[in-house]
Amino acid sequence: MRTLILLFLLTMGSYDVYASDVTVYTLSETSRYVLVVPHFQRIFIQLRSWEDDTLLDEVVLGSKYMQATHEDRDVILDTQKELVVKRRYGGTGFTETILEILAFIDDRIVNIGSFIIDHGSIGPGNGGSIKIEGRIRFTAINKLEYEFQKEIEENGKRSVISEREKYIFDTKLKKFVKKTPDH
């Protein structure tokens, strides 16, 4: 295992990554594990096999203006954990913080939900602005609530919209979908 982490750190090149930054999550079955290395502007996530130490899948997510953070959560009904990643990016006139939920399904890293938890943008000239503040609450296994407030300012007028959306994990689509009266 130490050899694997050292090899991964060497492949990172000149980036300032230390062994203490590396997190290893063993999945419920003993044949797979997840290697997570956050870096200032990226977070590297690898799904690997213990048996022959092969790389099954890899995802690199960008983050600007803050180091990406991650935590393991039991979000969907199974015996293994999922990964919740928070990252921030932006450009001229806007910034956005995204919370992404990643699951490890069929030897793949699958994004099962992405939610904006902070957004700010300013239009060119006197084009107005948009601000979104949101939060995710895991209410039960396979269920979550996304609550957000959207503030829009245009031509000196300000409007505020507050919403609470309920999501349920769809096992066929392998992602969270907005709950409708059908569910």
Image (cartoon, helix red, strand yellow):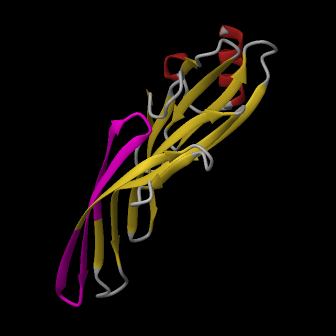
Against 166, residue 80 (above or below) is above
Does the magenta segment cover residue 180? no
Residue at the spot 54% in from the left edge and 45% down from the top edge? 112
Looking at the image, residue 96 sits to the left or right of residue 81; the answer is left
Looking at the image, residue 15 sits to the left or right of residue 83; the answer is right
Q: Which residues are magenta?
A: 132-161
Looking at the image, residue 39 sits to the left or right of residue 161; the answer is right
Residue 87 seen in the figure: yes
Kindly give the residue lying farthest to the bottom in the view shown: 155
Give residue 159's position: percent from left, percent from top: 19, 78
Residue at the spot 45% in from the left edge and 37% down from the top edge? 84
Question: Which of the 4 image quadrants contains residue 160?
Answer: bottom left
Kindly give the residue lying farthest to the top in the view shown: 2
Q: Quadrant of the N terminus?
A: top right
Question: Front-most of 43 and 148?
Answer: 148
Question: Which of the 4 image quadrants contains residue 147?
Answer: bottom left
